[in-house]
Image (cartoon, rainbow, N blue to C red):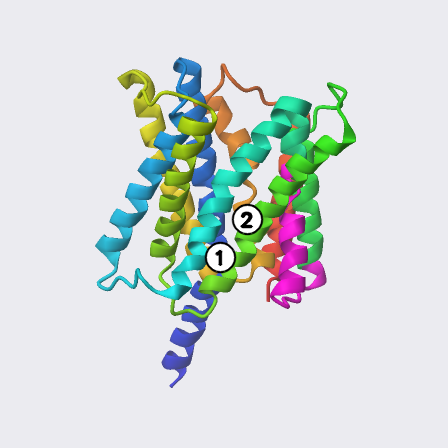
Amino acid sequence: MNDCRQDIVTLDEQRAVLPILFGLLTSLCFAIASLLAQRGYHRGPAPWGAWITIAVNCVFLFAGHFLLESETRLFIADNFIFVVVGLLVPGATRVLSFRGIRTMGSAITSTIINTTPMFSTILAVLVLSERPGPLVLLGVALTVAGLITVSWVGRQATFQKIELIYPFSCALLFSLKDVTVRWGLAGGGGQPILAAGIAALTSTVEIYFITRYIQKEKFVLPPPEVFSWFVWSGIFTGGSFLFMYIALSMERVTIVAPLINSYAIFVLLLTPFMARRIESVTWRKIAGAGLVVAGIFLVSVGKD
C-alpha cells in the first residue's frame, strides 16, 4: 500500500514539473529558431524566409501528430478555434510588429511586446477565472520587468503616441493566443499537436497571401546556403509550438505564459555561441535575465 501511495506521489510530482519543463523548452526552441532565422537573413536577402519557417513548422507538427497519435479528429467544430489562433499568431502579430518597428524602432516595439505575460495573466483571470497566488503574481511581475530590461535601450526616435497601438495590440493578440489555446485544450480530450498543426497551416496560408499579394513579393526561394537556415528555424519553431500547446493543455495560463514568453533570455544565453557577430551581450541584459530567472522560480514555487 505504501509503495502504491509513493508511486502516486511520484506521478503527481512529475505531472507538476512537466508543464514547467515544456514551457521552458518552448522558449528555448523559439530562441534557437529566431537566431537561426537571423543568421539566414544575415547571409542574404530572403523575403520568403518567414513563410519557409512557418511552412516547415507546419510539416513538422503534422508529421509529429501522425507519428504519435493513432487517431485524428480533424473535421470537428472544436478545431475551428485553432484556425482563429493561426490567423492571429503569427499572421496578424507579424503585420503589427513590423508596423511598430517601422515607425518606432525595434527596441521600443520589442519592449512593449515583452509585456505579453502581464496581459496573459489579466485575461486568464478575467476570462478563465484563474486565481494565481501572490508568489505567481510577483513572479509574473519580475518576468515582465526582466524582459523589458533586456530589450530597453532608451528612447531613440520620436513618434506619434497613436503608434503605440501597434505593439500593444501585438502583445494583446499574443496573450489572447495563450488564453484561447488553454480554453480549447483545457478539457484534456483535445489533441494538442494537431491543434498546433492546424494553427500553423492557417498561418502558412495567411503569410503566403500577405507576402505575395500585400507585400507584392514574387515567389522565389533563396539560395541553398540561405534556405537551409530557415528550414532549421522552421524545425525548431515546430518544437516550440509543440511544447507550447502541450504545456497549455496541462497547466493554467498564469503559470505557463511567463515561461513560454521568456525566449528573449534564451536568445541572450545563446547569442555568444550562435550570433556573436550579430548581437551583443551587455550587463543590462544580464541583469534583466536575472530578474526573469527569479520570476520563473517564483512562478514555479507558487503554482500550487
- Residue at image coords 58%, 32%: 97
Q: Residue furthest bottom?
A: 1
The quadrant where residue 216 appears: top left
- Figure check: 200 above or below 66: above
Q: Secondary structure at mark 1?
A: helix
Residue where numbered disc 2 is placed = 259
Residue 32 relative to residue 98: left or right: left
Q: Is residue 47 magenta?
A: no
**Location of mark 1 (residue):** 181
**In the figure, 58 relative to 78: above or below?**
above
The quarter of the picture where residue 292 lies is top right
Residue 206 visible in the snapshot: yes
Amino acid type of the residue tagged 2 in the rendering: Leu
Residue drawn where x is 61% and y is 58% of the image:
254
- Quarter of the image with the N terminus is bottom left
Q: Earlier in the sequence, mark 1 or mark 2?
A: 1
Residue type marked 1: Val
Residue 249 drawn at (x, y percent)? 45, 61
Task: Check residue 122 for magenta coloring.
Answer: yes
- Which residue range is magenta in the image? 113-135
In the depicted structure, whether residue 12 falls above or below residue 234: below
Between the C-alphas of marks 1 and 2, the distance is: 15 Å
